[in-house]
Amino acid sequence: MRYVLAVQRTDSIYTCVVYKRRINDEFLLERDEKKHLEIYYASFEYVNEEAKVVIVGITPGFHQMKKSFSTVIDAAERRHNDEEILRQAKNNSSFEGPMCKNLVKMLNDQELNEHLDLSSSSGLFKKAIHFVHTTSELAYSVFCNGKNCSESTPSLLKNEMLKNYITGNFAAELINLSESLIIPLGVTVSNALNYLVKKEIVSSEQILSGFPHPSGGNGHRHKQFADNKRAMKDMLKVHFAKMEVSD
């Protein structure tokens, strides 16, 4: 928890993260000089092991990292324990804005909300947040040439530094979520999960394959969603039927 304490020691968010993404070097975890990659700490260690659904992105972006630091700083004044601080940081820094709207629409189109007895999947980011665990295959913030990672840059499984986070942190996280439905946001995340399936770390039966990344910048998301919609709906029915039997 030394990074949580380091964030709390700062006077304000601007001491952690300042103009033009100049980040306090105290939070630098690793750097690949050759590939111009940097990994910085973000307060996303909390795992909701009771989650029915796990939504997986690539890596927390600059905005999410900044929000996680803000939450930790604010929580320091309320004297919460470390686990509660990290839970708040994860929940407060989750999906929002247009991307969240796109994600909710696709989840509702898949009728995920009905399987969870919710009027809308938007509840997963509000009152029903206990049903969901949001995470990333790279748990901390990764920047390529000083910018947020994208679906194609960098190639995660071909870079040893990044691959170690997938086979280490991410794999360990999923072991404790073996009964949960996993929704990978886009091809990059799906490829990482398929790699872990081959390593027998996660079951392919948990994964909602074919789900597109909900970013507005993903021009192929509508076609990808339409092409895979029927298969994903069928998978959801099978998954939740199994969950009812096991309950």
Image (spheres, rainbow, N blue to C red):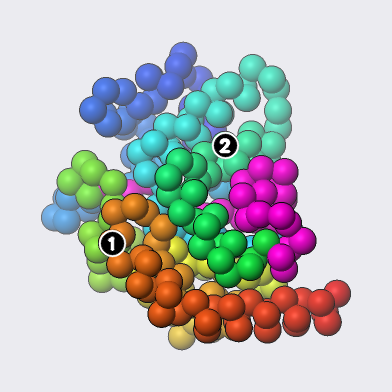
Q: Residues within 10 Å of mark 2 (few under 14, many from 20)?
A: some
Residue 165 vertical placement versus 228 (above, below) = above
Residue closer to the observer: 197 or 33: 197
Does 130 lie within the magenta span? yes
Residue 213 sits in quarter:
bottom left
Horizontal placement of 176 versus 187: left or right?
Answer: right
Residue 5 location (% of width, % of height)? 54, 28
Residue found at x 72% / y 49%: 128
Question: Which image quarter is the N terminus in?
Answer: top right
User: Which residue type does callout 2 highlight?
Assistant: Asn
- Label 1 residue SS: loop
- Residue 61 falls in which quadrant of the image? top left
Residue at mark 1: 219
Question: In the rendered structure, are the residues bearing label 2 and label 1 in contact, judged by CB atoms less than 8 Å apart?
Answer: no
Residue 5 shown left or right of residue 247 in the figure: left
Secondary structure under tag 2 reads helix
Whole-percent x, y for residue 93 in the image? 52, 39
| Start-end of magenta stretch | 114-143
Identify the mark at residue 92; answer none if there is no mark: 2
| Pair 2/1: label in front | 1
- Dot 1 alpha-carbon crowd within 10 angstroms: few under 14, some 14 to 19, many 20 or more: few
**Where is residue 119, by image quadrant?**
bottom right
Front residue (pair 11, 88): 88
